[in-house]
Image (spheres, coloured by chain):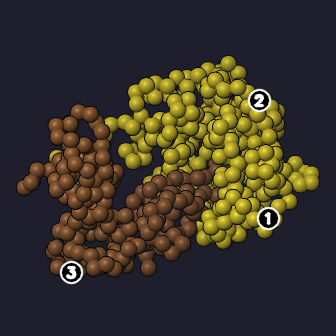
Chain colours: A brown, B yellow
Amino acid sequence: MATIGTNEMRVGVKIMVDADPCVIVDSDLVKPGKGQAFTRVKFRNLKTGRVLERTYKSGDSAEAADVIDTDLQYLYADGEFWHFMDLASYEQLSADQNAVGDAAKWLKEQDTCTVTLWNGAPITVTPPNFVTLKIVQTDPGIRGDTASGGTKPAMLETGAVVKVPLFIEEGESIKVDTRTGEYVSRVKEGE
Amino acid sequence: MVTVAWAPTARPETLRLRADLLARIRRFFADRDFLEVETPLLGAAAALDPHLSSFVVGCDGVADRDLYLQTSPEFAMKRLLAAGSGPVYQICKAFREAESGRWHSPEFTLLEWYRPGFDHHRLMDEVDVLVCGILGTPAAVRMTYDQAFEELAGWSPRDADMGMLRRAAREQGLAEDVGAETDRDGLLDFLFSHTVQPGLAGRGAVFVYDFPATQAALARVRAGNPPVAERFELLVQGVELANGYHELIDPAEQRRRFECDQTRRRERALPAYPLDERLLAAMAHGLPPCAGVALGVDRLVMLAAGASSIDEVIAFPISRA
């Protein structure tokens, strides 16, 4: 197994910490003029998303995490697994609830997602930054009210609930930023 | 088209501030009748401290063996002192392999000076005048190494054995980090940088002095229970800015420490460097009792400019060298 020395622990490098794959988000040398050198590393656990710190003595090493990001098309969910396909190889992969997590509420069939694989198995699923989804339920719109700035909840076809302006109607499609969960714009049929 | 990063990483106003600080430093020493000196950056010997790594330079046709970029001008400046130079200072480049980070650059600028007849307390007074004059901070607070731990970490490292140090790390939630560290001074360095220095971050200038005898480096050790090294560090906002000694002048003890460092280097499979016989010969001739200090000029500029990375105060850091 490949190892990563303290001098290679740079931002973006993926290492194993406490048996979990992590990506380094910050790294700095801690070294007294006279004394032992350390590398202080801030990393994000790719399974939990938590950011933690660890200090390595210079010359120490960590195991490299066999982690890659792949763009896969979302096919369908069967109640237990979410199924994805590599459009180049037609190879299919299934991700469980732990890997999909909150992304589930943005997954629309045939959208392309970033699936992070650890040792070949999905550990996280990142939906596209923007998705277009149909509103399946919301209170009746107030026609023409584009200025008051008021909002109301709307349930989307994937089950997600977002705040939309008052003039938006049931059955319309809207564009949503999945990173913030916020309404971006109305999408006309065919766009 | 390929874009080549040719431009300086420091802003013009930072470079002007840097030039202004260098001029003020030179004026400070001129006013005190110091001799400004220059000593070789390429030396036949290297620092033997196992925590320092020197760049080796092949010198075909010039020297009959490899030379080393100096990690500090200390050895050569002490040879000048032994020759009767009186108070000397130098502003020069120093080189430390594998040191790169927000506060470190493998090539950096050191201000180093020596005061015959001074001990470390008198030298701290002088460092205080220079640094507080430049940074505009109030006079530095002084605390011993033990007091620094007691005040900022809540426990004393005095007489602390490995078990106690590991327990202290565990109580700070740092047990995973220190892992299998077996060296007591390595563990102390870790705890100092992770528990004491963060506590000093909100403070102005603080001198920490009288270090454990095992961390004497080139300082005298004062007998006592326990014995302590007459060494100090100046920390400003928790950043190590200077390191000084009431200098060791005994050549036999110096040789013993060099040999001890060489043994530690061998044990850790670190590169072997030649021992500086010229320094030992100068000390045998007679190094006057003195105190000396090295101060990181880049860090001083960083603090004065409020910079968050050393690259902001160096025109061309190693990535653009």
Query: At 87% across and 48% down in the image, what residue appears?
Result: B222
Mark-to-mark CA distance, 1 and 2? 35 Å
The answer to whether the residue labelled 1 contacts the one labelled 2, judged by CB atoms less than 8 Å apart, is no
Residue B201 percent location from the top left of the image: 64, 40
Query: At 62% across and 64% down in the image, what residue appears?
Result: B177
Q: Are marks 3 and 2 on the same chain?
A: no
Judging from the image, mark 2 belongs to the subunit labelled B
Q: Is residue A138 above or below residue B291?
A: below
Give the camera-side residue of A44 and B307.
Answer: A44
Q: Mark 3 points at which residue?
A: A91
Residue B259 percent location from the top left of the image: 73, 62
Give residue B77's quadrant in the image.
Answer: top right
| Amino acid bearing label 2 | Asp
Mark 3 surroundings: few (<14), some (14-19) or many (≥20) residues within 10 A: few
Residue A163 percent location from the top left of the image: 31, 48
Query: At 17% across and 68% down in the image, what residue appears?
Result: A110
Q: In this view, does A187 lie above or below B177?
A: above
Question: Can you tell which mark lies on residue B164?
Answer: 1
Judging from the image, mark 1 belongs to the subunit labelled B
Circle 1 or circle 2, nearest the eye: 1
Mark 1 surroundings: few (<14), some (14-19) or many (≥20) residues within 10 A: few
Q: In which quarter of the image is the C terminus of chain B?
A: top left
The answer to whether the residue labelled 3 contacts the one labelled 1, judged by CB atoms less than 8 Å apart, is no
Give the camera-side residue of B135 and B44.
Answer: B135
Q: Mark 2 points at which residue?
A: B125
Give residue A112's quadrant in the image.
Answer: bottom left
